[in-house]
Amino acid sequence: MNEKINSFQERAKLLRCEVTDAIIGILKENNLSELQLSQNPDEVPWVVWFNDEMYGYDSRVKVVSIEGNGIAVEVYDEDCCSSATLTSDNLDLACTNIDWLCIILNSITYTLSLPKSTGITEIAGHIIEWSYDEPGLSEIPEREQEEIEGLIQAGNSNGALFYNDNDMEFEGTWKIKSI
């Protein structure tokens, strides 16, 4: 009986390593050391983790990165405003559960398949090219436009964009195309 249990444990370990290697492989194939995952509610992976006081959290995975010989996931719990970076090297539950690893791998594939939102708009007399890493935006949100205007007045010709809308986060870039 112990041989059968040991066989299952070894097979589970091999499968966990195979999925982790697939995650690392897809990140490397896309020249990435980390990836902010889509926060599309239908695609975001959720994992359970425990803080130092052993309080458990059910949180969404925001970022997956390569760390050491394995992976790390950044998680965030909105209810308690708690976050953590969990790693496979530390054998954190979020990075060792085969089901969750497969869901994380699917989310990576989904995120990498998304087309970017792009556009051109006029701000402070300048034509601005912009893009967000996720689809769904047809214009730069007003709050971001105001920030860009201030940056242009301060002498910047490009920069980062960040927009949070109902738990959906969009990151992107902008640059002056012409005056």
Image (cartoon, helix red, strand yellow):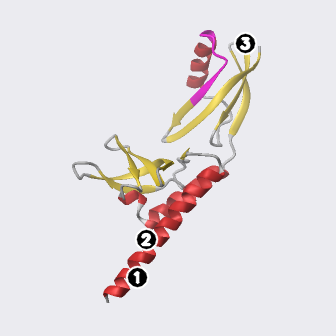
**Mark 2 crowdedness (10 Å alpha carbons): few <14, some 14-19, many ≥20:** few
Q: Residue sitting at 43 percent across and 50 percent down?
A: 60
In the image, is 87 to the left or to the right of 57?
Answer: right
The location of residue 21, given as percent across then percent down, is 54, 61
Q: Nearer the viewer, mark 3 or mark 1?
A: 1
* Mark closer to the chain start, 2 or 1: 1
How many circles with numbers are drawn on the protein?
3
Disc 1 marks which amino acid? Ser
The location of residue 98, given as percent across then percent down, is 45, 67
How much space separates mark 2 and mark 1, taking CA atoms? 10 Å
> Which residue carries the number 1 mark?
7
**Mark 3 crowdedness (10 Å alpha carbons): few <14, some 14-19, many ≥20:** few
Q: Which mark is residue 13?
A: 2
Q: Which mark is residue 125?
A: 3
**Mark 1 crowdedness (10 Å alpha carbons): few <14, some 14-19, many ≥20:** few
The answer to whether residue 154 is magenta is yes
- Residue 126 in which image quadrant: top right
Q: Residue sitting at 41 percent across and 62 percent down?
A: 96
Part of the protein shown in magenta: 153-161
* Closer-to-camera residue (32/41): 32
The quadrant of the rendering that contains the C terminus is: top right
The answer to whether residue 96 is magenta is no
* Closer-to-camera residue (168/157): 157
Q: From this viewpoint, which residue is outermost toward the left? A: 53
Question: Relative to residue 129, is residue 79 depicted above or below?
Answer: below
